[in-house]
Amino acid sequence: MKSSRRTFLITSIGVASSLALSRQAFADAPKVAETDPTAQALGYKADASKVDKAKYAKYAAGQECDNCSFYQGKAGDAFAPCPMFAGKQVSGKGWCSAYNKKA
């Protein structure tokens, strides 16, 4: 029984360490630049108030990345990952044409 407890503790420590390191990796992920080709294709702006409303008629005031269903952070996070920009973080106050209101 001692060996299974020891195995459990070692495994638990390993899992906890992995989670902590992966969270740090997301925190260090690069930020999406508005000049990024994907960002340009999706009309990404780090500040939603600067969206060209004539070019992106879908945009409405109040739409921001932190209230989009794709945003992988919590509301209020300054930056978080978004699957539209694989491996990069978007501004919580940003916007792109893939915006989809969180349910």
Image (tube, grey):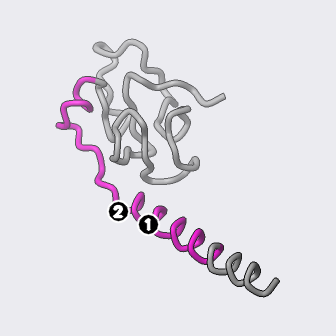
In front of the other: 45 or 98:
98
| Residue type at the position of mark 2 | Asp
| Residue type at the position of mark 1 | Gln
Q: Position of residue 34 (x, y in %)?
A: 23, 38
* Contact (Cβ within 8 Å) of mark 2 with mark 1: yes
Q: Is residue 27 magenta?
A: yes
Is 59 left or right of 43, judged from the image as shown?
Answer: right
Q: Residue at x 35, y 40 (%)?
A: 86
- Can you tell which mark lies on residue 13? none
Q: Residue at x 28, y 44 (%)?
A: 32
- Can you tell which mark lies on residue 24? 1
Q: Which residues are magenta?
A: 12-41
Question: Would you place residue 81 above or below residue 42 in this image?
Answer: below
Q: Quadrant of residue 95?
A: top left
Q: Residue at x 53, y 73 (%)?
A: 17
Give the residue pinned by disc 2: 28
Question: Would you place residue 85 above or below residue 100 in this image?
Answer: below
Dot 1: within a 10 Å radius of its alpha carbon, few (fewer than 14), some, or many (20 or more) residues? few
Question: Would you place residue 96 above or below residue 79 in this image?
Answer: above
SS at badge 2: loop
Q: Main secondary structure of the magenta part?
A: helix
Q: Position of residue 1 (x, y in %)?
A: 82, 83
